[in-house]
Image (cartoon, rainbow, N blue to C red):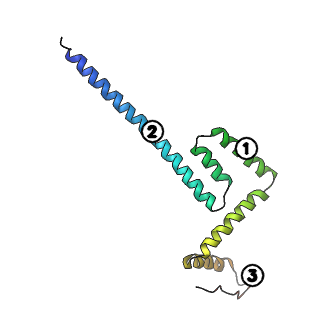
Amino acid sequence: MLIPMQTVVMLVLLALVGFLGAKWLFQKDAAVVDRRRGAAKLAAVLRSYGLVRIPDFLIDYSVADIAGMATKIKALADLSVSGEDAILTELNSVFDKVLVEKLKTEAGRAFIASKLSDAVKPEDTSVIQDAPVPATK
């Protein structure tokens, strides 16, 4: 019993289309996994600098917890409506941690010094003139 050539060609084409379709679907899945993995890594970095709320959103995204994200977005909206104190407290914490990191390096101290010199105007009497310079190690 011989199989007609048309049937063989059709089976080969069908197998090829199935293979390419499966490969395409797995590539899409891999892209989603990579995005989620990146979100989790970013959440860890942001949390190390003191942010709390944004990393929570990213963690929820990384595990596909849409309901958790929506709940946290609503809580953040409620928080921002009730006042800025909680948000400013978190941002001040981040500022303190970034400042500590900047002060650890010579380049960071130079960066801060340049920003301070840009901010200080000679005619501004509220600025302390001739402030002591921290000792270098």
Frontmost of labels 3 and 2 is 2
Give the residue type that dot 2 points to. Lys
Residue 58 position within the rendered picture, expressed as x and y whole percent measured from the top left: 60, 49
Q: Residue at x 18, y 13 (%)?
A: 2
Give the residue type that dot 3 points to. Val
Among numbered discs 1 and 2, the one appearing first in the sequence: 2
Residue 61 position within the rendered picture, expressed as x and y whole percent measured from the top left: 59, 44
Write down the quadrant of residue 87 in the picture: bottom right
Mark 1 — residue? Answer: 74
Q: Residue at x 77, y 83 (%)?
A: 125
Disc 1 packing (10 Å; few <14; some 14–19; many ≥20): few
Q: Nearer the viewer, residue 5 or 104?
A: 104
Disc 3 packing (10 Å; few <14; some 14–19; many ≥20): few
Q: Residue at x 46, y 43 (%)?
A: 31
Among numbered discs 1 and 3, the one appearing first in the sequence: 1
From the viewer's perspective, is residue 59 above or below residue 102? above
Mark 2 — residue? Answer: 28
- Relative to 7, is 132 on the left or the right? right
Whole-angstrom CA distance, mark 3 to mark 2, is: 57 Å
Which circle marks residue 127 in the picture?
3
From the viewer's perspective, is residue 72 above or below residue 134? above
Where disc 3 sits, the SS reads loop
Residue 9 position within the rendered picture, expressed as x and y whole percent measured from the top left: 24, 21
Image quarter where the N terminus lies is top left
Where disc 1 sits, the SS reads helix
Q: Residue furthest top?
A: 1
Q: Residue at x 28, y 25 (%)?
A: 13
Where disc 2 sits, the SS reads helix
Give the residue type that dot 1 points to. Lys
Whole-angstrom CA distance, mark 1 to mark 3, is: 41 Å
